[in-house]
Image: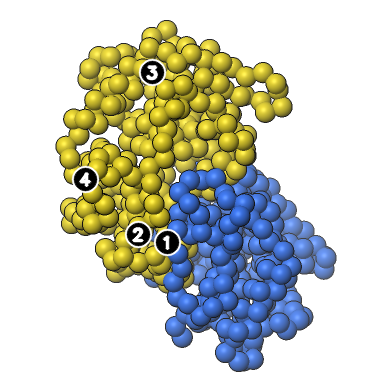
Chain colours: A yellow, B blue
Amino acid sequence: MMAKVLINGRAEQQLSAADRGLSYGDGLFETIQIASGTALLWDAHMLRMQRGAARLKIPFDASLRALFHQDFLSLLQSSSTNAVLKLTLTRGVGMRGYKPDPQATITRISSLTALPDFTDQQRHGITVRLCRLQLARQSVLAGVKHLNRLEQVLARSEWDDPDITEGIVCDTEGKLIEGTMSNLFWVANGILYTPDLTYSGVEGVIRNALISQCRQQSLCEVRTASYELSQLLVADEIFVCNSVINILPVVTLIVDDAAPKAEVYQVGPITRALQKMLHNLYLKDAPH
Amino acid sequence: MMAKVLINGRAEQQLSAADRGLSYGDGLFETIQIASGTALLWDAHMLRMQRGAARLKIPFDASLRALFHQDFLSLLQSSSTNAVLKLTLTRGVGMRGYKPDPQATITRISSLTALPDFTDQQRHGITVRLCRLQLARQSVLAGVKHLNRLEQVLARSEWDDPDITEGIVCDTEGKLIEGTMSNLFWVANGILYTPDLTYSGVEGVIRNALISQCRQQSLCEVRTASYELSQLLVADEIFVCNSVINILPVVTLIVDDAAPKAEVYQVGPITRALQKMLHNLYLKDAPH
């Protein structure tokens, strides 16, 4: 399946070279899983984009939300479609200079691509490695899924081995933050841990859903704070999650590329319970 | 003068919505002053882009440099043209996912716009203010003129007053770094100071030229280190610089928007000497 693209609702593949999304990464994006024609956790994705837009002072209102939804329906091949829907919002075309033009019209890009199959990794787990790159601490942008993603590009370019699915990144103070494309969780003594994202990282829709569902369903205690790598190393279970991969158990963690030995983990009962919980949450999600 | 644009050497205004420059800000740019048909400090701009490309592992070789130069000649209206030439280099079109595709072909964008007239501000000085936004510390990206510029967008959106030309930004540890679009210098007791850019900021071509020329010509002692705002406040002279504005003396510094009083500075002898030195450096610059 080639990407199908809509730019401002029109079937086009190209946009202006003067778009501030290109000039400055001045925008946001969402990556949404489409399962049997349903955009999973649509409301949560729209809410995150709206919050990000508020942070960047990019206009976002109910009509924009409706237009993105219209794009989705128009891109949808059939009610049995499984796919990845990517929605991008930029501040629009601008003149040279950082100052946002209040008269500018935002740019809306919606595209549909094939959903990769992660069934095997969801079942048997993956290998991850610790990245050398450390994320900068910037509370003004932390949590937001914006278009300034050079840190992720550099972290992901550290390895080529196709057997390594993800890289774990810490911040410049050495605190655990997330994966290059996912959020990080681990279990120790029956408690679920995930790093606080006040200073770095992206607040994943799946991350937030897991935290709130765990609390609502009293499935297990969840703690979010600032953690060191040493705490991850002694975990009973580790997993990473995002809207496309869902929950991938980590069975091997390579801390030092040069060292022959890697930490090995089990796919534990809490990871399995959360995979099931996420599956049920998806089933409950109203069709869109 | 409307922008004239070349994309990969062709007169086009649009590029692929799947370009990684848009998706991730995965690229670099240069802003070059064209005076009477000459691209000022061309070699220094090309060298900076080459170094940035090495940092981001984007291919950059002599043939790319030649292609950018060919773009410039083709955009040039006449040998008497004064303009701003913006050159952008991205990693090119990519699939979804942060991992750079080694097979990807880079995207080259060259555009020519009108040169704003800063004569009056160069002569009489400008008003600047201190920004609330603090720059993150990221040594891997510091110095590089990359396309991840949300911090500059947010800093520049802090004020609307057209009488304020520039904003000064510190890093998250409160150290002085630069202006939103310029580098920062000041003079105290005959010594020229400018912040070290190991952790944040853009290494301006004019900044580096001023530092090296001052040292070569023994015009004055130059110090680059980590400095506090308090040191700027007691300066004898302050100026900001970049390739379009050249050197703009700062005569008013607003530290607190809410406070009625502002620090006032003179346009001093060292600032004037450096303006003259930069002018002479431009004259020496071989025509391109």
What residue sits right under mark 3 in the picture? Answer: A271
Residue neighbourhood size for the residue with mark 1, other residues' Cα within 10 Å, grouped as few (<14), some (14–19), many (≥20): many
Whether residue B35 is visible to the viewer of this picture, yes or no, is no
- Ranked by sequence position, the earlier of labels 4 and 2 is 2
| Along the line of sight, the residue nearer the viewer: A184 or B205 | A184
Q: Residue at x 64, y 91 (%)?
A: B79
What residue sits right under mark 2 in the picture? Answer: A5
Whether residue B19 is visible to the viewer of this picture, yes or no, is yes
Residue neighbourhood size for the residue with mark 3, other residues' Cα within 10 Å, grouped as few (<14), some (14–19), many (≥20): many
As helix, strand or loop, the secondary structure at mark 4 comes to loop
| Along the line of sight, the residue nearer the viewer: A39 or B149 | A39
What residue sits right under mark 4 in the picture? Answer: A79
As helix, strand or loop, the secondary structure at mark 2 comes to strand
Q: Based on the displayed image, in which of its 4 quarters is residue B74 positioned?
A: bottom right
Tell me the amino acid under the disc marked 1.
Answer: Ala
Q: Gap in Å between the C-alphas at discs 2 and 1?
A: 8 Å
Q: Nearer the viewer, mark 4 or mark 2?
A: 4
Q: Are marks 4 and 3 in contact (CB under 8 Å)?
A: no
The image's mark for residue B17 is 1
Q: From the top left corner, tell me how far across and down residue B169 is, in percent.
A: 51, 53
